[in-house]
Image (spheres, rainbow, N blue to C red):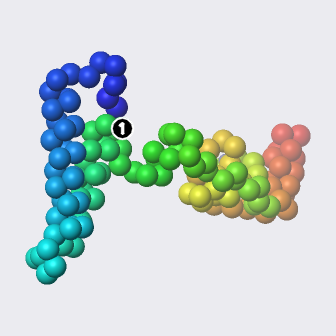
Amino acid sequence: MLNPNKIKKSEAIKIIRLYEEYTRAVVAARIGPLGFPACGDFFLLSQQKEDELQEYLFGTSNLVQLGEMWGIIKEPKSKKTKLYCIICKRVQYRTLSGLVCKKGHGGASSISRTEVKKIRLRKKKREEI
Ligand SMILES: [Zn+2]
């Protein structure tokens, strides 16, 4: 990400060039004469140039990432399930990217509370021997 307080002349020139390319594509897409060939292509080009500019300025053009970075969007609170992680036997939470336990075992298979109890009981018996 560029530091606005330490911007170099070459970086400023690149930003202006990218913004001009973006603006030219927007002009062609929005107010090109009726029947102007490939208005849709210019719209697509304007989006590509906008992405390029955002990547150069902010390090990404992913709107979800930018939204999270700026606190505009928040990932919804993960919901506790009745399922348990097969690896660490801890409760699993439902997130946008799937099930995960507190230990971070994302996508690990799930087992029920009853199965967890059976496993703990077997382990305990083994320790007693
Ligand atoms: Zn786990």
Q: What is the quadrant of the C terminus in the image?
A: top right
Q: What is the quadrant of the N terminus in the image?
A: top left
Residue 13 image offset from top left, x and y in percent: 15, 32
Q: Between 23 and 84, which is closer to the camera in this rendering? A: 23
Left or right: 126 in relation to 87? right
Q: Is residue 63 visible?
A: yes
Residue beneath disc 1? 58
Going by the picture, which residue comes out furthest to the left?
Answer: 37
Left or right: 63 in relation to 126? left
Disc tally is: 1
Q: Residue at x 75, y 48 (%)?
A: 90
Left or right: 20 in relation to 1? left
4 to 110, vertically: above or below: above
Q: Between 9 and 68, which is closer to the camera in this rendering? A: 9
For badge 1, the amino acid type reads: Phe
The quarter holding residue 107 reads: bottom right
The quarter holding residue 119 reads: bottom right
Residue 99 image offset from top left, x and y in percent: 64, 58
Q: Residue at x 70, y 51 (%)?
A: 77
Q: Is residue 86 visible?
A: no
Residue 100 image offset from top left, x and y in percent: 64, 52
- Does mark 1 have its CB less than 8 Å from ligand 1? no
Left or right: 123 in relation to 1? right
Q: Residue at x 30, y 43 (%)?
A: 55
Going by the picture, which residue comes out furthest to the bottom?
Answer: 35
| Crowd around label 1: few <14 · some 14–19 · many ≥20 (10 Å) | some
Q: Between 81 and 5, which is closer to the camera in this rendering? A: 5
Q: Residue at x 74, y 56 (%)?
A: 79
Residue 30 image offset from top left, x and y in percent: 24, 67
**SS for callout 1:** helix
